[in-house]
Amino acid sequence: MKVLNFGSCNIDYVYQMEHFIRPGETAPCTALSAGCGGKGLNQSIALAKAGTEVYHAGLYGAEGKFLLDKMQEAGVDTSLMRLGEGANGHAIIQVERSGQNCIILYGGTNRQITQDYADEVLSHFAAGDVLVLQNEINMVGEIIRLSHEKGCRVVFNASPIPGKPEELPLELVDIFMVNELEAAALAGTSTEGDFRDILKALQKKYPKAAIVMTLGKEGVFYGYKEEFYSHPIFKVNAVDTTAAGDTFCGYFLAALCAEKSVETALREASAASAMAVSAKGAAP
């Protein structure tokens, strides 16, 4: 079994702020750093650090060559990546004193996936392999279809929330990795009320899929048919919540690929995510 992460790789420009910028306001930042990020890259590095053999596919800009170097250092196979045209995808991230963040994304080369490239990448994978996708690249729907036709197990981290979920073949997804807002958007239900109701609504809409729903300070829920598990967070001093969800995704999937139980996967992923928010930065 091989794991393919067909995803984004971004340059993260991180601005440390006293508070998030308000409309019409100009304010200084206390520090600026540039590093590697993107949900795809973050999850590939998390998968590799958790001991999984993972291949990353996607396009990068000329200034983003260091992103490949960082993935390779972590143990990610980048042989399927290709150089795109123009600027690399990047993110402008504000991190306020509490550790919370807000992010502006520029797609750049992440949005240049073609049918020919998708076909080339997927020709290296077969039934039983695992495809991991986020929503920061184009061609998401077609990649899901192609992977399903090959018999791959499709894992979709629906982040950012798809603008028109109904246009994606989500009935072919085997595992959804979502937070409560993403789950509600996919299910077409309200974010108010009990988290369990949101989970049940998404399960009703996609009854063949397993749902992993992260809930921030409330921990995580897992639902698959009649199965249900939950796990609380490990309480730590949160310095920077950037990539907390990506870390969780990578370690959870790594545990499943290692044939560990769902309970163990939830515990290990929760611990890894707690460690991630205890330090500044995304992939580092």
Image: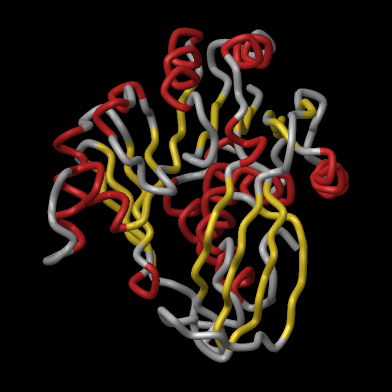
Compared across the picture, whether 154 is left or right of 49 comes to left
Q: Residue at x 77, y 38 (%)?
A: 61
* Residue located at (67% from left, 35% from top): 109
Residue at the (57%, 91%) spot, across then down: 18
Residue nearer the viewer, 197 or 102: 102
Quadrant position of residue 279 = bottom right
Find residue 107 and report its horizontal and vertical position in percent.
Answer: 58, 43
**Residue 118 picture location, percent across and down:** 60, 16
Up-down: is 89 above or below 96?
Answer: above
Q: Position of residue 35 (x, y in %)?
A: 77, 61
Q: Is residue 43 above or below residue 95?
A: above
Residue 225 found in image quarter: top left
Q: Quadrant of the N terminus?
A: top right
Judged left or right of residue 252, residue 60 is: right
* Quadrant housing the C terminus: bottom right
Position of residue 150 in the picture relative to residue 4 (left or right): left
